Image (cartoon, rainbow, N blue to C red):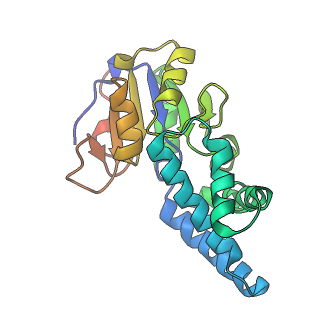
Amino acid sequence: METIDWRSIRLVVFDMDGTLYDQRVLRMAMLRGLLLDAFQQRSLKTVRSIAMFRRVREELAETESPDFAVRQYEWTAERTGTSAESVRALVEEWIEKRPLRHLLSARFPGIDELLGRLRERGIVTAVWSDYPATEKMEALGLQADLIVSADHPEIGMLKPSPAGLRLIMEKMGCCAEETIMIGDRKERDGLAAETVGVRALIKTKDRSCSFPYFNSYGDAPFRFGPE
C-alpha cells in the first residue's frame, strides 16, 4: 500500500459503482426487490433480463464496441426473446432509478471527507462511470467538478477503453502525470488508466492486485502530508 505525493496531483478521477459505494449492500437491497417482483408477477422475466443485460455489457466491454449503447439492448432482447424497448424500460427502472433510494446507506465511509480535502487542496475531481452517474451522485450526497459516463457522445465506449479518461483530462487541462484514477476493477479501471499512463489506485482486499491498492478511504494513500 503506497503513499502518494499529493503535491504533484491536480486531478483525481473516480469510478462510481463499487468505488464510491458498496455494491454488495446495494445488490442485496435490489435482490429483495427483484424477488418480490418475481413473486408478484409469477415470473422470473425481470430477473433473467437484468442478469442477461449485465452479461451482455461485460461482453461489449471486452470487445470495446463503439456502438454498445444500441447493442446492449438489442443483444439482450435477442437472448431473452423480448423487445429492445422492453429491455430498455427494465434497465431504466431496475438499474437506473430504483437503486437511487438505497445509495446513501451504501456510501463508503470517508469518501465525502476525501472529496472535501481534495477541494481544499485545489485538486479537481471527476467521476467516470460506465453507467449514468449524475443522479447517483445526487443520491449519494456527493459532488465532483465533472461527471461523465460511457454514453457521453465524445466517449461512446465502455471501460477498459480509456476514451472517458482522455476526455476528462482534456476538459480539465491536466496531463497523465498529474492525474490519478481510483476504481475497484483492475481489469477495467486499472487497465484504462495504464493505457494512457495514468496512475491507478484500486479499491480491493486482494493483496495480489498488480496495481497499487487500498481497502478504505482512511488508508495510507489518502493521508495527506504538508502542502
The x and y percentages for residue 84 are 75, 56
Residue 141 shows in this picture? no
Location of residue 32 by image quarter? bottom right
**Quadrant where the N terminus is found in the figure:** top left
Location of residue 179 by image quarter? top left
Residue 220 shows in this picture? yes
- Between 43 and 128, the one lying in front of the other is 43
**Quadrant where the C terminus is found in the figure:** top left
The x and y percentages for residue 37 are 73, 79
Horizontally, residue 44 falls left or right of residue 128, namely right
Q: Residue furthest top?
A: 173
Horizontally, residue 31 falls left or right of residue 7, namely right
- Between 3 and 212, the one lying in front of the other is 212
The x and y percentages for residue 91 are 70, 58
**Residue visible at 39% across and 29% down in the picture:** 180
**Residue visible at 54% across and 22% down in the picture:** 167
Horizontally, residue 174 falls left or right of residue 190, namely right
The x and y percentages for residue 66 are 57, 35
- Between 80 and 184, the one lying in front of the other is 80
**How many labels sit on residues?**
0
- Between 215 and 39, the one lying in front of the other is 39
Location of residue 175 by image quarter? top left
**Residue visible at 68% across and 44% down in the picture:** 70
**Residue visible at 26% across and 56% down in the picture:** 206
